[in-house]
Image (tube, grey):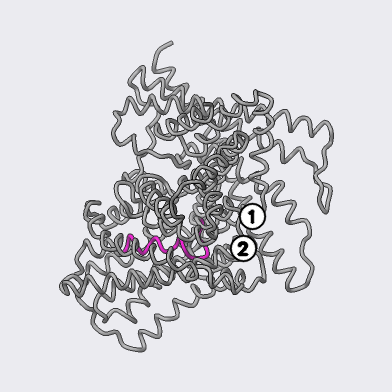
Amino acid sequence: MIVALVIVSLFVLLAIGTPVGFAMAISGGAGLWLIGGYDMLRGILQTSPLSVVGSYELLTIPMFLLMAELVLVSGVADDLFLAAAAWIGRVPGGLGMATALAGAGFGAICGSSTASAATLSSTSLPAMLKQGYEPRMAAGVVAISGTLSMLLPTSVALVIYGLLAEVNIGKLLVSGIIPAILVTLTIMLTILFLVWQDPSRAPSLTNVPITEKLRLLKAVGPMLVLFGIVTGVIYTGIATPTEASAFGASGAFLLAIWRGRLNRHTVTHAFTHAAQGTCMITMILVGASIFSYFFTLTQSTQHLVHWVGHLDVSRWVIIGLILCGYIVLGSFMDQIAILVLTVPIVLPLIKSLGFDPIWFGVIKIVTAEVGMITPPIGLNCFIVARYANRPVVDVFHGIFPHFIAHLIIIAIFVAFPSIILWLPSRM
Amino acid sequence: MRPAWRAMMLERLDRALTALERLASALAAVALFLIMAIVASDVALRYLFNRPWGWSYDFISLYVMVALFFLALSRTFAVNGHISVDLLHHYLTPSTRRWCELVICLLSAGLFALITQAGAIRAWQSYIDNDILAGVLAWPAWPSAALMPLGAGMITLRLALSMVCHAYTLFTGREVILLPPIAGSAQAIESGSFE
Protein backbone atom coordinates (compact mmCIF):
# COMPACT_ATOMS: atom_id res chain seq x y z
CA MET A 1 0.00 0.00 0.00
CA ILE A 2 2.73 2.45 1.03
CA VAL A 3 4.74 1.41 -2.04
CA ALA A 4 1.85 2.19 -4.39
CA LEU A 5 1.27 5.51 -2.65
CA VAL A 6 4.92 6.49 -2.94
CA ILE A 7 5.12 5.53 -6.62
CA VAL A 8 1.97 7.49 -7.42
CA SER A 9 3.32 10.51 -5.55
CA LEU A 10 6.59 10.23 -7.49
CA PHE A 11 4.72 10.33 -10.80
CA VAL A 12 2.52 13.22 -9.67
CA LEU A 13 5.60 15.19 -8.59
CA LEU A 14 7.33 14.46 -11.91
CA ALA A 15 4.21 15.40 -13.87
CA ILE A 16 3.87 18.83 -12.25
CA GLY A 17 7.48 19.53 -13.22
CA THR A 18 9.47 18.87 -10.05
CA PRO A 19 13.19 18.50 -10.85
CA VAL A 20 13.80 14.75 -11.18
CA GLY A 21 16.32 14.43 -8.34
CA PHE A 22 14.11 16.46 -5.98
CA ALA A 23 11.03 14.38 -6.84
CA MET A 24 12.81 11.08 -6.13
CA ALA A 25 14.24 12.39 -2.85
CA ILE A 26 10.90 13.80 -1.69
CA SER A 27 8.81 10.72 -2.49
CA GLY A 28 11.49 8.27 -1.33
CA GLY A 29 11.99 10.32 1.84
CA ALA A 30 8.25 10.38 2.53
CA GLY A 31 8.13 6.60 2.06
CA LEU A 32 11.03 6.08 4.47
CA TRP A 33 9.27 8.28 7.03
CA LEU A 34 6.09 6.19 6.67
CA ILE A 35 7.81 2.82 7.13
CA GLY A 36 10.62 3.67 9.53
CA GLY A 37 9.75 6.93 11.25
CA TYR A 38 11.68 10.18 11.50
CA ASP A 39 14.89 8.75 12.97
CA MET A 40 15.42 6.40 10.06
CA LEU A 41 14.75 9.16 7.54
CA ARG A 42 17.22 11.46 9.30
CA GLY A 43 19.86 8.74 9.36
CA ILE A 44 19.56 8.18 5.63
CA LEU A 45 19.48 11.90 4.82
CA GLN A 46 22.67 12.31 6.85
CA THR A 47 24.64 9.62 5.08
CA SER A 48 23.20 9.18 1.60
CA PRO A 49 24.21 12.51 -0.08
CA LEU A 50 27.78 12.27 1.22
CA SER A 51 28.21 8.64 0.22
CA VAL A 52 27.00 9.32 -3.34
CA VAL A 53 29.18 12.41 -3.72
CA GLY A 54 32.19 10.73 -2.14
CA SER A 55 32.36 7.89 -4.65
CA TYR A 56 35.59 8.23 -6.60
CA GLU A 57 34.17 6.99 -9.90
CA LEU A 58 31.63 9.82 -9.93
CA LEU A 59 34.56 12.06 -10.91
CA THR A 60 34.28 10.71 -14.44
CA ILE A 61 31.09 12.73 -14.97
CA PRO A 62 32.49 16.21 -14.20
CA MET A 63 35.63 15.41 -16.17
CA PHE A 64 33.74 14.32 -19.31
CA LEU A 65 31.37 17.30 -19.03
CA LEU A 66 34.36 19.62 -18.71
CA MET A 67 36.10 17.96 -21.63
CA ALA A 68 32.98 18.50 -23.78
CA GLU A 69 32.83 22.19 -22.84
CA LEU A 70 36.52 22.73 -23.57
CA VAL A 71 36.37 20.85 -26.88
CA LEU A 72 33.50 23.15 -27.86
CA VAL A 73 35.60 26.19 -26.96
CA SER A 74 38.54 24.90 -29.01
CA GLY A 75 36.49 24.91 -32.24
CA VAL A 76 37.82 21.54 -33.45
CA ALA A 77 34.41 20.51 -34.76
CA ASP A 78 34.37 23.02 -37.64
CA ASP A 79 37.65 21.69 -38.99
CA LEU A 80 36.53 18.08 -38.66
CA PHE A 81 33.56 18.72 -40.90
CA LEU A 82 35.64 20.66 -43.46
CA ALA A 83 38.14 17.80 -43.67
CA ALA A 84 35.43 15.13 -44.04
CA ALA A 85 33.62 17.22 -46.66
CA ALA A 86 36.80 17.69 -48.73
CA TRP A 87 37.46 13.96 -48.79
CA ILE A 88 34.03 12.51 -49.51
CA GLY A 89 32.08 15.55 -50.74
CA ARG A 90 31.95 14.24 -54.33
CA VAL A 91 30.15 11.01 -53.48
CA PRO A 92 26.34 11.27 -53.85
CA GLY A 93 25.06 12.65 -50.55
CA GLY A 94 28.70 13.31 -49.62
CA LEU A 95 28.12 16.32 -47.40
CA GLY A 96 25.49 14.38 -45.47
CA MET A 97 27.96 11.54 -44.97
CA ALA A 98 30.63 14.03 -43.97
CA THR A 99 28.20 15.26 -41.30
CA ALA A 100 27.81 11.73 -39.95
CA LEU A 101 31.60 11.26 -39.90
CA ALA A 102 32.15 14.63 -38.23
CA GLY A 103 29.44 13.68 -35.72
CA ALA A 104 31.27 10.44 -34.93
CA GLY A 105 34.68 12.14 -34.73
CA PHE A 106 33.37 14.93 -32.57
CA GLY A 107 31.38 12.46 -30.47
CA ALA A 108 34.59 10.58 -29.71
CA ILE A 109 35.90 13.59 -27.80
CA CYS A 110 32.69 15.30 -26.66
CA GLY A 111 30.23 13.24 -24.67
CA SER A 112 27.20 15.49 -24.85
CA SER A 113 24.60 14.82 -27.53
CA THR A 114 22.99 18.25 -27.42
CA ALA A 115 26.35 20.03 -27.60
CA SER A 116 27.21 17.87 -30.59
CA ALA A 117 23.93 18.63 -32.38
CA ALA A 118 24.36 22.35 -31.74
CA THR A 119 27.91 22.32 -33.09
CA LEU A 120 27.02 20.37 -36.24
CA SER A 121 24.04 22.67 -36.77
CA SER A 122 26.28 25.68 -36.92
CA THR A 123 28.86 24.13 -39.29
CA SER A 124 27.54 21.37 -41.55
CA LEU A 125 23.92 22.50 -41.85
CA PRO A 126 24.67 25.83 -43.58
CA ALA A 127 27.18 24.06 -45.85
CA MET A 128 24.59 21.50 -46.98
CA LEU A 129 21.88 24.11 -47.51
CA LYS A 130 24.29 26.24 -49.56
CA GLN A 131 25.01 23.20 -51.72
CA GLY A 132 21.29 22.90 -52.45
CA TYR A 133 20.42 19.96 -50.18
CA GLU A 134 16.76 19.35 -49.40
CA PRO A 135 16.41 21.20 -46.05
CA ARG A 136 14.44 18.40 -44.39
CA MET A 137 17.05 15.82 -45.24
CA ALA A 138 19.93 18.07 -44.17
CA ALA A 139 18.29 18.83 -40.82
CA GLY A 140 17.53 15.15 -40.22
CA VAL A 141 21.15 14.11 -40.80
CA VAL A 142 22.43 16.76 -38.39
CA ALA A 143 19.98 15.81 -35.63
CA ILE A 144 20.78 12.09 -35.83
CA SER A 145 24.56 12.54 -36.16
CA GLY A 146 24.60 14.52 -32.92
CA THR A 147 23.40 11.47 -31.00
CA LEU A 148 26.55 9.47 -31.85
CA SER A 149 28.36 11.08 -28.93
CA MET A 150 26.23 9.08 -26.50
CA LEU A 151 27.83 5.81 -27.63
CA LEU A 152 31.49 6.78 -27.80
CA PRO A 153 33.91 6.59 -24.86
CA THR A 154 33.48 10.12 -23.51
CA SER A 155 29.75 9.52 -23.15
CA VAL A 156 28.27 10.93 -19.96
CA ALA A 157 25.17 8.78 -20.45
CA LEU A 158 27.21 5.55 -20.50
CA VAL A 159 29.04 6.55 -17.31
CA ILE A 160 25.74 7.22 -15.54
CA TYR A 161 24.50 3.79 -16.62
CA GLY A 162 27.76 2.25 -15.41
CA LEU A 163 27.45 3.92 -11.98
CA LEU A 164 23.83 2.81 -11.60
CA ALA A 165 24.40 -0.73 -12.88
CA GLU A 166 27.71 -1.12 -11.01
CA VAL A 167 29.43 -2.60 -14.05
CA ASN A 168 33.05 -2.12 -15.11
CA ILE A 169 32.96 1.40 -16.57
CA GLY A 170 36.10 0.89 -18.66
CA LYS A 171 34.63 -2.14 -20.42
CA LEU A 172 31.30 -0.39 -20.82
CA LEU A 173 32.86 2.64 -22.52
CA VAL A 174 34.91 0.47 -24.87
CA SER A 175 31.91 -1.71 -25.75
CA GLY A 176 30.19 1.29 -27.37
CA ILE A 177 32.88 1.75 -30.04
CA ILE A 178 31.91 -0.94 -32.57
CA PRO A 179 28.17 -0.19 -32.28
CA ALA A 180 28.99 3.51 -32.81
CA ILE A 181 30.87 2.68 -36.01
CA LEU A 182 27.94 0.55 -37.21
CA VAL A 183 25.46 3.29 -36.36
CA THR A 184 27.60 5.80 -38.32
CA LEU A 185 27.57 3.44 -41.31
CA THR A 186 23.80 3.03 -40.93
CA ILE A 187 23.33 6.79 -41.09
CA MET A 188 25.52 6.95 -44.21
CA LEU A 189 23.64 4.08 -45.88
CA THR A 190 20.33 5.76 -45.09
CA ILE A 191 21.61 8.90 -46.82
CA LEU A 192 22.71 6.86 -49.85
CA PHE A 193 19.27 5.27 -49.99
CA LEU A 194 17.53 8.68 -49.84
CA VAL A 195 19.76 10.08 -52.59
CA TRP A 196 19.24 6.95 -54.73
CA GLN A 197 15.48 7.50 -54.41
CA ASP A 198 15.70 11.13 -55.49
CA PRO A 199 19.13 12.45 -56.61
CA SER A 200 17.91 16.07 -56.57
CA ARG A 201 17.87 15.88 -52.76
CA ALA A 202 21.66 16.19 -52.54
CA PRO A 203 23.69 17.80 -55.34
CA SER A 204 27.37 16.76 -55.40
CA LEU A 205 30.26 18.98 -54.50
CA THR A 206 32.94 20.10 -56.97
CA ASN A 207 36.33 18.51 -56.56
CA VAL A 208 38.82 19.79 -54.01
CA PRO A 209 42.54 19.81 -54.99
CA ILE A 210 44.65 17.16 -53.29
CA THR A 211 46.93 19.69 -51.58
CA GLU A 212 43.89 21.29 -49.96
CA LYS A 213 42.66 17.84 -48.89
CA LEU A 214 45.96 17.09 -47.19
CA ARG A 215 46.05 20.50 -45.52
CA LEU A 216 42.57 19.95 -44.07
CA LEU A 217 43.55 16.52 -42.80
CA LYS A 218 45.75 18.21 -40.19
CA ALA A 219 42.56 19.11 -38.29
CA VAL A 220 41.99 15.45 -37.52
CA GLY A 221 45.24 15.33 -35.51
CA PRO A 222 44.04 16.96 -32.26
CA MET A 223 40.88 14.85 -32.37
CA LEU A 224 42.91 11.64 -32.67
CA VAL A 225 45.22 12.69 -29.84
CA LEU A 226 42.32 13.41 -27.49
CA PHE A 227 40.56 10.19 -28.48
CA GLY A 228 43.81 8.32 -27.90
CA ILE A 229 44.49 9.71 -24.45
CA VAL A 230 41.04 8.73 -23.25
CA THR A 231 40.10 5.56 -25.12
CA GLY A 232 43.63 4.26 -25.67
CA VAL A 233 44.48 4.70 -22.00
CA ILE A 234 41.30 2.90 -20.90
CA TYR A 235 41.66 0.08 -23.45
CA THR A 236 45.27 -0.70 -22.64
CA GLY A 237 44.58 -0.50 -18.92
CA ILE A 238 47.25 2.15 -18.29
CA ALA A 239 44.80 4.10 -16.14
CA THR A 240 41.26 3.74 -14.82
CA PRO A 241 38.38 5.42 -16.71
CA THR A 242 38.27 8.03 -13.94
CA GLU A 243 41.93 8.94 -14.44
CA ALA A 244 41.54 8.81 -18.22
CA SER A 245 38.66 11.29 -18.01
CA ALA A 246 40.84 13.74 -16.09
CA PHE A 247 43.52 13.27 -18.75
CA GLY A 248 40.94 13.97 -21.44
CA ALA A 249 39.78 17.16 -19.72
CA SER A 250 43.39 18.37 -19.29
CA GLY A 251 44.09 17.55 -22.94
CA ALA A 252 41.06 19.53 -24.07
CA PHE A 253 42.19 22.38 -21.78
CA LEU A 254 45.65 22.43 -23.39
CA LEU A 255 44.11 22.16 -26.87
CA ALA A 256 41.94 25.20 -26.22
CA ILE A 257 44.99 27.13 -25.00
CA TRP A 258 47.09 26.01 -27.98
CA ARG A 259 44.42 27.16 -30.42
CA GLY A 260 44.24 30.52 -28.65
CA ARG A 261 40.57 30.18 -27.78
CA LEU A 262 40.89 30.42 -24.02
CA ASN A 263 40.12 33.78 -22.42
CA ARG A 264 38.56 34.86 -19.15
CA HIS A 265 35.06 34.67 -20.53
CA THR A 266 35.28 31.24 -22.20
CA VAL A 267 37.13 29.71 -19.26
CA THR A 268 34.57 30.93 -16.72
CA HIS A 269 31.70 29.76 -18.89
CA ALA A 270 33.16 26.30 -19.53
CA PHE A 271 33.99 25.60 -15.88
CA THR A 272 30.74 26.99 -14.42
CA HIS A 273 28.63 25.19 -16.98
CA ALA A 274 30.39 21.87 -16.35
CA ALA A 275 30.11 22.39 -12.57
CA GLN A 276 26.37 22.98 -12.82
CA GLY A 277 25.93 19.98 -15.11
CA THR A 278 27.74 17.84 -12.56
CA CYS A 279 25.55 19.20 -9.79
CA MET A 280 22.39 18.44 -11.74
CA ILE A 281 23.42 14.84 -12.47
CA THR A 282 24.70 14.26 -8.92
CA MET A 283 21.44 15.57 -7.46
CA ILE A 284 19.55 12.99 -9.54
CA LEU A 285 21.87 10.25 -8.28
CA VAL A 286 21.34 11.44 -4.68
CA GLY A 287 17.56 11.38 -5.19
CA ALA A 288 17.82 7.93 -6.73
CA SER A 289 19.88 6.65 -3.81
CA ILE A 290 17.29 7.88 -1.27
CA PHE A 291 14.50 6.37 -3.36
CA SER A 292 16.26 3.06 -3.75
CA TYR A 293 16.76 2.77 0.05
CA PHE A 294 13.00 2.86 0.26
CA PHE A 295 12.59 0.39 -2.59
CA THR A 296 15.12 -2.02 -1.13
CA LEU A 297 13.57 -1.90 2.34
CA THR A 298 10.15 -2.76 0.94
CA GLN A 299 11.68 -5.51 -1.26
CA SER A 300 9.70 -4.22 -4.25
CA THR A 301 12.38 -5.08 -6.81
CA GLN A 302 12.57 -8.71 -5.71
CA HIS A 303 8.81 -9.06 -5.95
CA LEU A 304 8.83 -7.67 -9.48
CA VAL A 305 11.73 -9.86 -10.60
CA HIS A 306 10.06 -12.90 -9.07
CA TRP A 307 6.79 -12.12 -10.80
CA VAL A 308 8.33 -11.58 -14.24
CA GLY A 309 10.56 -14.63 -13.78
CA HIS A 310 7.49 -16.81 -13.48
CA LEU A 311 5.74 -15.41 -16.54
CA ASP A 312 5.28 -18.03 -19.22
CA VAL A 313 6.86 -16.06 -22.10
CA SER A 314 10.22 -16.11 -23.86
CA ARG A 315 12.90 -13.79 -22.44
CA TRP A 316 13.16 -12.24 -25.92
CA VAL A 317 9.55 -11.10 -25.70
CA ILE A 318 10.34 -9.45 -22.37
CA ILE A 319 13.43 -7.66 -23.68
CA GLY A 320 11.45 -6.58 -26.75
CA LEU A 321 8.75 -5.09 -24.54
CA ILE A 322 11.33 -3.34 -22.35
CA LEU A 323 13.02 -1.75 -25.39
CA CYS A 324 9.66 -0.64 -26.85
CA GLY A 325 8.89 0.89 -23.45
CA TYR A 326 12.22 2.76 -23.55
CA ILE A 327 11.51 4.19 -27.00
CA VAL A 328 8.09 5.41 -25.85
CA LEU A 329 9.51 6.88 -22.62
CA GLY A 330 12.31 8.50 -24.60
CA SER A 331 9.84 10.42 -26.72
CA PHE A 332 8.76 12.56 -23.78
CA MET A 333 11.29 12.19 -20.98
CA ASP A 334 14.85 13.27 -20.40
CA GLN A 335 17.37 10.46 -21.01
CA ILE A 336 19.19 10.80 -17.68
CA ALA A 337 15.87 10.74 -15.87
CA ILE A 338 14.89 7.56 -17.69
CA LEU A 339 18.18 5.89 -16.81
CA VAL A 340 17.94 6.75 -13.13
CA LEU A 341 14.27 5.86 -12.79
CA THR A 342 14.41 2.54 -14.63
CA VAL A 343 17.88 0.98 -14.39
CA PRO A 344 17.71 0.04 -10.68
CA ILE A 345 14.47 -1.85 -11.39
CA VAL A 346 15.04 -3.17 -14.92
CA LEU A 347 18.63 -4.32 -14.45
CA PRO A 348 17.97 -7.03 -11.80
CA LEU A 349 15.31 -8.30 -14.19
CA ILE A 350 17.72 -8.33 -17.13
CA LYS A 351 20.32 -10.19 -15.06
CA SER A 352 17.77 -12.74 -13.83
CA LEU A 353 16.83 -13.44 -17.47
CA GLY A 354 20.48 -14.22 -18.18
CA PHE A 355 21.40 -11.16 -20.27
CA ASP A 356 24.72 -9.33 -20.00
CA PRO A 357 24.45 -5.93 -18.22
CA ILE A 358 27.10 -4.34 -20.49
CA TRP A 359 25.27 -5.51 -23.60
CA PHE A 360 22.02 -4.17 -22.20
CA GLY A 361 23.63 -0.82 -21.34
CA VAL A 362 24.81 -0.22 -24.90
CA ILE A 363 21.42 -1.17 -26.34
CA LYS A 364 19.70 1.05 -23.80
CA ILE A 365 21.88 3.96 -24.96
CA VAL A 366 21.01 3.32 -28.62
CA THR A 367 17.32 3.51 -27.68
CA ALA A 368 18.17 6.73 -25.83
CA GLU A 369 19.65 8.07 -29.10
CA VAL A 370 16.34 7.34 -30.75
CA GLY A 371 14.61 9.15 -27.88
CA MET A 372 16.70 12.27 -28.60
CA ILE A 373 15.05 12.52 -32.04
CA THR A 374 11.43 11.36 -31.54
CA PRO A 375 8.55 13.82 -31.18
CA PRO A 376 7.20 15.52 -29.16
CA ILE A 377 10.28 16.20 -27.00
CA GLY A 378 13.24 15.00 -29.16
CA LEU A 379 15.70 17.60 -27.93
CA ASN A 380 18.17 17.38 -30.82
CA CYS A 381 15.42 18.18 -33.33
CA PHE A 382 14.53 21.35 -31.44
CA ILE A 383 18.15 22.43 -31.40
CA VAL A 384 18.58 21.84 -35.13
CA ALA A 385 15.26 23.57 -35.88
CA ARG A 386 16.39 26.60 -33.96
CA TYR A 387 19.78 26.84 -35.70
CA ALA A 388 18.28 26.17 -39.14
CA ASN A 389 15.45 28.60 -38.44
CA ARG A 390 12.89 26.07 -39.69
CA PRO A 391 9.73 24.60 -38.14
CA VAL A 392 10.53 21.63 -35.93
CA VAL A 393 7.96 19.54 -37.85
CA ASP A 394 10.30 19.70 -40.86
CA VAL A 395 13.15 18.26 -38.83
CA PHE A 396 10.93 15.50 -37.44
CA HIS A 397 9.95 14.71 -41.02
CA GLY A 398 13.60 14.55 -42.09
CA ILE A 399 14.50 12.30 -39.17
CA PHE A 400 11.92 9.62 -40.01
CA PRO A 401 14.11 7.45 -42.33
CA HIS A 402 16.84 7.48 -39.66
CA PHE A 403 14.32 6.48 -37.02
CA ILE A 404 13.39 3.38 -39.06
CA ALA A 405 17.06 2.59 -39.74
CA HIS A 406 17.80 2.82 -36.00
CA LEU A 407 15.04 0.36 -35.15
CA ILE A 408 16.64 -2.12 -37.56
CA ILE A 409 20.11 -1.65 -36.09
CA ILE A 410 18.72 -2.10 -32.55
CA ALA A 411 17.19 -5.41 -33.65
CA ILE A 412 20.59 -6.47 -35.06
CA PHE A 413 22.37 -5.57 -31.79
CA VAL A 414 19.78 -7.56 -29.82
CA ALA A 415 20.10 -10.57 -32.10
CA PHE A 416 23.93 -10.60 -32.18
CA PRO A 417 25.26 -9.70 -28.69
CA SER A 418 28.85 -10.41 -29.74
CA ILE A 419 28.91 -7.21 -31.86
CA ILE A 420 28.85 -5.33 -28.57
CA LEU A 421 30.68 -7.77 -26.30
CA TRP A 422 33.65 -8.74 -28.49
CA LEU A 423 35.83 -5.65 -28.09
CA PRO A 424 35.54 -5.37 -24.26
CA SER A 425 36.28 -9.10 -23.99
CA ARG A 426 39.72 -8.45 -25.54
CA MET A 427 40.71 -6.00 -22.78
CA MET B 1 2.90 48.37 3.72
CA ARG B 2 2.56 49.45 0.09
CA PRO B 3 2.78 46.61 -2.53
CA ALA B 4 5.67 48.33 -4.34
CA TRP B 5 7.68 48.26 -1.15
CA ARG B 6 7.15 44.52 -0.80
CA ALA B 7 8.22 43.87 -4.38
CA MET B 8 11.37 45.89 -3.77
CA MET B 9 12.06 43.90 -0.62
CA LEU B 10 11.81 40.62 -2.57
CA GLU B 11 14.11 42.00 -5.23
CA ARG B 12 16.72 42.96 -2.63
CA LEU B 13 16.58 39.55 -1.01
CA ASP B 14 16.99 37.97 -4.42
CA ARG B 15 20.00 40.14 -5.20
CA ALA B 16 21.71 39.29 -1.90
CA LEU B 17 21.07 35.56 -2.31
CA THR B 18 22.22 35.64 -5.94
CA ALA B 19 25.50 37.28 -4.93
CA LEU B 20 26.06 34.53 -2.37
CA GLU B 21 25.20 31.81 -4.88
CA ARG B 22 27.49 33.26 -7.53
CA LEU B 23 30.37 33.24 -5.06
CA ALA B 24 29.64 29.62 -4.12
CA SER B 25 29.29 28.63 -7.75
CA ALA B 26 32.64 30.25 -8.60
CA LEU B 27 34.23 28.20 -5.81
CA ALA B 28 32.61 25.08 -7.29
CA ALA B 29 34.22 25.90 -10.64
CA VAL B 30 37.58 26.20 -8.86
CA ALA B 31 36.94 22.79 -7.28
CA LEU B 32 36.39 21.38 -10.77
CA PHE B 33 39.72 22.80 -11.93
CA LEU B 34 41.45 21.31 -8.87
CA ILE B 35 40.03 17.86 -9.61
CA MET B 36 41.30 17.99 -13.19
CA ALA B 37 44.75 19.24 -12.21
CA ILE B 38 45.24 16.92 -9.23
CA VAL B 39 44.08 13.69 -10.89
CA ALA B 40 45.96 14.30 -14.14
CA SER B 41 49.20 15.24 -12.37
CA ASP B 42 48.80 12.29 -10.01
CA VAL B 43 48.66 9.81 -12.89
CA ALA B 44 51.52 11.54 -14.70
CA LEU B 45 53.72 11.43 -11.58
CA ARG B 46 52.87 7.80 -11.01
CA TYR B 47 53.88 6.73 -14.49
CA LEU B 48 56.82 9.03 -15.10
CA PHE B 49 58.50 9.02 -11.68
CA ASN B 50 56.62 6.31 -9.82
CA ARG B 51 55.86 8.95 -7.16
CA PRO B 52 52.12 9.76 -7.03
CA TRP B 53 50.84 12.42 -4.62
CA GLY B 54 49.40 9.77 -2.32
CA TRP B 55 46.85 12.11 -0.77
CA SER B 56 44.90 12.90 -3.92
CA TYR B 57 42.32 10.11 -3.74
CA ASP B 58 41.16 10.93 -0.20
CA PHE B 59 41.45 14.68 -0.61
CA ILE B 60 39.27 14.73 -3.73
CA SER B 61 36.55 12.35 -2.64
CA LEU B 62 36.34 13.75 0.91
CA TYR B 63 36.46 17.46 0.20
CA VAL B 64 36.71 18.62 -3.40
CA MET B 65 33.84 16.61 -4.92
CA VAL B 66 31.67 17.40 -1.89
CA ALA B 67 32.42 21.11 -2.31
CA LEU B 68 31.73 20.95 -6.05
CA PHE B 69 28.29 19.46 -5.53
CA PHE B 70 27.01 21.38 -2.52
CA LEU B 71 28.39 24.78 -3.52
CA ALA B 72 26.83 24.57 -7.01
CA LEU B 73 23.47 23.21 -5.79
CA SER B 74 21.57 26.44 -5.21
CA ARG B 75 22.88 28.38 -8.22
CA THR B 76 22.03 25.44 -10.47
CA PHE B 77 18.44 25.60 -9.24
CA ALA B 78 18.31 29.38 -9.68
CA VAL B 79 19.31 29.09 -13.37
CA ASN B 80 16.88 26.17 -13.90
CA GLY B 81 19.74 23.73 -14.33
CA HIS B 82 18.03 20.84 -12.53
CA ILE B 83 16.17 18.97 -15.24
CA SER B 84 12.49 18.17 -14.94
CA VAL B 85 9.79 16.55 -17.04
CA ASP B 86 7.74 19.47 -18.36
CA LEU B 87 5.45 17.65 -20.78
CA LEU B 88 2.33 18.71 -18.85
CA HIS B 89 3.46 22.33 -18.70
CA HIS B 90 2.94 22.64 -22.47
CA TYR B 91 -0.79 22.44 -21.82
CA LEU B 92 -1.18 24.47 -18.61
CA THR B 93 -2.10 28.13 -18.22
CA PRO B 94 0.60 30.38 -16.70
CA SER B 95 -1.28 30.71 -13.42
CA THR B 96 -1.71 26.92 -13.06
CA ARG B 97 2.00 26.57 -13.80
CA ARG B 98 2.70 29.02 -10.98
CA TRP B 99 0.63 26.92 -8.58
CA CYS B 100 2.72 23.91 -9.61
CA GLU B 101 5.93 25.83 -8.96
CA LEU B 102 4.57 26.90 -5.59
CA VAL B 103 3.93 23.30 -4.55
CA ILE B 104 7.33 22.18 -5.91
CA CYS B 105 9.19 24.91 -4.00
CA LEU B 106 7.26 24.20 -0.80
CA LEU B 107 7.94 20.43 -0.81
CA SER B 108 11.55 20.82 -1.94
CA ALA B 109 12.19 23.48 0.71
CA GLY B 110 10.88 20.98 3.28
CA LEU B 111 13.24 18.29 1.99
CA PHE B 112 16.32 20.50 1.97
CA ALA B 113 15.45 21.97 5.38
CA LEU B 114 15.51 18.41 6.75
CA ILE B 115 18.82 17.70 5.02
CA THR B 116 20.24 20.96 6.41
CA GLN B 117 19.16 20.08 9.93
CA ALA B 118 20.37 16.47 9.73
CA GLY B 119 23.67 17.59 8.18
CA ALA B 120 24.22 20.33 10.76
CA ILE B 121 23.76 17.85 13.61
CA ARG B 122 26.26 15.48 12.06
CA ALA B 123 28.82 18.19 11.30
CA TRP B 124 28.59 19.62 14.83
CA GLN B 125 28.92 16.16 16.34
CA SER B 126 32.02 15.31 14.34
CA TYR B 127 33.55 18.71 15.21
CA ILE B 128 33.04 18.12 18.94
CA ASP B 129 34.22 14.51 18.76
CA ASN B 130 37.17 15.53 16.60
CA ASP B 131 36.33 12.76 14.11
CA ILE B 132 39.14 11.59 11.87
CA LEU B 133 38.54 9.93 8.51
CA ALA B 134 40.71 6.92 7.86
CA GLY B 135 43.16 7.23 5.03
CA VAL B 136 46.84 7.71 4.31
CA LEU B 137 46.69 10.94 6.29
CA ALA B 138 44.36 11.77 9.18
CA TRP B 139 41.77 14.04 7.60
CA PRO B 140 39.34 15.89 9.92
CA ALA B 141 35.75 14.91 9.10
CA TRP B 142 33.90 18.08 10.03
CA PRO B 143 34.80 20.32 7.02
CA SER B 144 33.42 17.68 4.70
CA ALA B 145 30.30 17.21 6.83
CA ALA B 146 29.80 20.99 7.16
CA LEU B 147 29.57 21.50 3.40
CA MET B 148 26.28 19.57 3.37
CA PRO B 149 24.26 21.90 5.65
CA LEU B 150 25.94 24.88 3.97
CA GLY B 151 24.81 23.93 0.45
CA ALA B 152 21.46 22.51 1.54
CA GLY B 153 20.80 25.60 3.65
CA MET B 154 21.51 27.89 0.71
CA ILE B 155 19.09 26.07 -1.57
CA THR B 156 16.46 26.00 1.19
CA LEU B 157 16.61 29.80 1.29
CA ARG B 158 16.45 29.97 -2.52
CA LEU B 159 13.42 27.65 -2.63
CA ALA B 160 11.65 29.61 0.12
CA LEU B 161 12.29 32.88 -1.71
CA SER B 162 11.07 31.47 -5.04
CA MET B 163 7.96 30.20 -3.29
CA VAL B 164 7.17 33.62 -1.81
CA CYS B 165 7.83 35.26 -5.19
CA HIS B 166 5.48 32.87 -7.01
CA ALA B 167 2.79 33.45 -4.36
CA TYR B 168 3.28 37.22 -4.60
CA THR B 169 2.97 37.08 -8.39
CA LEU B 170 -0.19 34.96 -8.16
CA PHE B 171 -1.92 37.25 -5.68
CA THR B 172 -0.88 40.67 -6.95
CA GLY B 173 -0.44 40.00 -10.67
CA ARG B 174 2.93 41.77 -10.55
CA GLU B 175 5.53 39.38 -11.99
CA VAL B 176 8.51 39.26 -9.60
CA ILE B 177 9.77 35.85 -10.78
CA LEU B 178 9.71 34.28 -14.24
CA LEU B 179 8.36 30.79 -14.90
CA PRO B 180 11.07 28.31 -15.90
CA PRO B 181 11.40 27.87 -19.69
CA ILE B 182 9.76 24.81 -21.26
CA ALA B 183 12.04 22.25 -22.97
CA GLY B 184 12.42 22.87 -26.68
CA SER B 185 11.38 26.51 -26.43
CA ALA B 186 13.79 29.14 -27.71
CA GLN B 187 14.41 30.27 -24.11
CA ALA B 188 15.38 26.80 -22.95
CA ILE B 189 17.85 26.27 -25.77
CA GLU B 190 19.39 29.66 -25.20
CA SER B 191 19.99 28.86 -21.54
CA GLY B 192 21.73 25.66 -22.66
CA SER B 193 20.61 22.42 -21.05
CA PHE B 194 22.28 19.03 -20.78
CA GLU B 195 21.29 15.85 -22.49
Q: Secondary structure at mark 2?
A: helix
Q: Amino acid at mark 2?
A: Pro
User: Do residues under tags 1 and 2 come within 8 Å of each other at their CB atoms?
Assistant: yes
Question: What chain does mark 2 sit on?
Answer: A
Q: Position of residue B3 (x, y in %)?
A: 39, 15
Q: Would residue A161 appear left or right of B41 to someone viewing this image?
A: left
Q: Circle 2 is placed at which residue position?
A: A241
Image position of B120 with respect to A343: above or below? above
Magenta segment includes B168: no
Q: Nearer the viewer, residue A339 or B163?
A: A339
Q: Would residue A91 appear left or right of A262 to someone viewing this image?
A: left
Q: Circle 1 is placed at which residue position?
A: A57
Magenta segment includes A148: yes
Q: Do the residues marked 1 and 2 share a common chain? A: yes
Q: Which mark is residue A223?
A: none
Q: Nearer the viewer, residue A70 or A301?
A: A301
* Residue A124 position by quadrant: bottom left
The residue segment tinted magenta is A142-156
Question: What chain does mark 1 sit on?
Answer: A
